[in-house]
Image: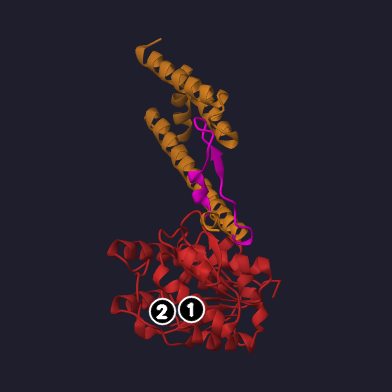
Amino acid sequence: MPEHDSLIVLIPAFNEEPTIGDIVSHVKRRWCCPVAVIDDCSTDRTAQVARAAGAIVLPLTLQLGAWGAMQTGLRYALQQGYRTAITLDGDGQHDPEGIGELLAPLATGQADVAIGAFPERASRARRIAWSYFRWLTGLQLEDITSGFRAYNHAAIHVLAASEASLLDYQDVGVLLILRRRGLRTVEVPVAMQPRTQGASRVFRSWWLVGQYMLQTSVLCLARIGHGHLSRSSDD
Amino acid sequence: MTTYEITLMVIGVCIAAVILWLVRRDHLHGPYAIWWMGAAVTVGGLGFFPQLFDYLAVYVGIRYPPILAIVLALGLLILKILTMDLERSRQERLIRRLAQRLAMLEARLPLAPIHTVQPSTGQQSENPSGALSDSARTP
């Protein structure tokens, strides 16, 4: 298992004031590692609450969305020399107790990225969307959109690069980059809580779902024939 | 000189003049200025010598010469729009990474509140642009 002094937990947050404090405290108490909250232009007191709970706050000046915020955290982790990064949502869906299960495949060298999967949470429409993207990309993952992930240093290095900066979503595009770079991704079954507040930023309205499906389809089609590149030299 | 030739000349010269004025006033920067200077010269030249299309159309097998002008103009416009979107994508990437970099810097070194002096009262007040930093508002 990675040493905790090389581990950082990253939480992208947008208006998560009611939950962020508890999550930060829980992670710090249980894992004794730094927690960075990336505040994606919240209009409430998310940043202050997170800071009061002991988190390092990275306040974005422009709203970059879930992936943009996540990448900010990964860049920060890389800059600060952390070897492993855990990402989890700030809405209380992901139980920090599951971090240990995510770290296990990285510690044994089984994978470079571990995704905490709980496909049962998905609605029928979302499952259809996942099946469609699996068919389009050949990805063998059940829970494509889960934000509960562990990245090792090689994966952090790849995803912090500018190649990933124009992605708008953290799912298919990110997974395709990892696959292209020859990094191994595994899913780990974890428990998830129902959202206590807020809503999915992607599955909020049919218009946004349509936009997401179209944009991600184009991304998948654009990546057809992209061969595997060599693993990051930093690995 | 026929009326249509005069019309074309006036339109060509006007477009070229506007472009040159914008370039001279530094409203069009670097590579954009080069593209538009080329456009100004082309439009101006064709305004004076519209019969050039008649000769060119014969060489490329187009029976109705004005169509050649329209096809060329459309092609160049599509090319220009494409390069504009390429440039927008490049700038979008830069802006996102700049915002991320700023957030990383603010995490390491919270910015101090920005104070400005009110000219009328001489009193200091927090600049609204201090909204840049959430951390600037908290001790």
Tag 1 and tag 2 share a subunit: yes
Chain ID of residue with mark 1: A
Question: Quadrant of residue A231 in the image?
Answer: bottom right
Tell me which amino acid carries mark 1.
Answer: Phe
B62 in relation to A83, above or below: above
In the drawing, what numbered circle is on residue A148?
Answer: 1
Q: Mark 2 lies on which chain?
A: A
Q: Say which quarter of the image contains residue A156.
A: bottom right
Crowding near the residue tagged with mark 1, few <14, some 14–19, many ≥20 C-alpha atoms within 10 Å: many
What type is the residue that disc 2 sits on?
A: Gln
Q: Residue A93 carries which label?
A: 2
Q: Position of residue B94 (x, y in %)?
A: 57, 52
The span picked out in magenta is B107-133
Give left or right: position of B103 versus A190.
Answer: right
Q: Which chain is red?
A: A
Residue located at (47% from left, 73% from top): A21
Whether the magenta-drawn stretch holds residue B123 is answered as yes
- Is B105 displayed left or right of A16 in the figure? right
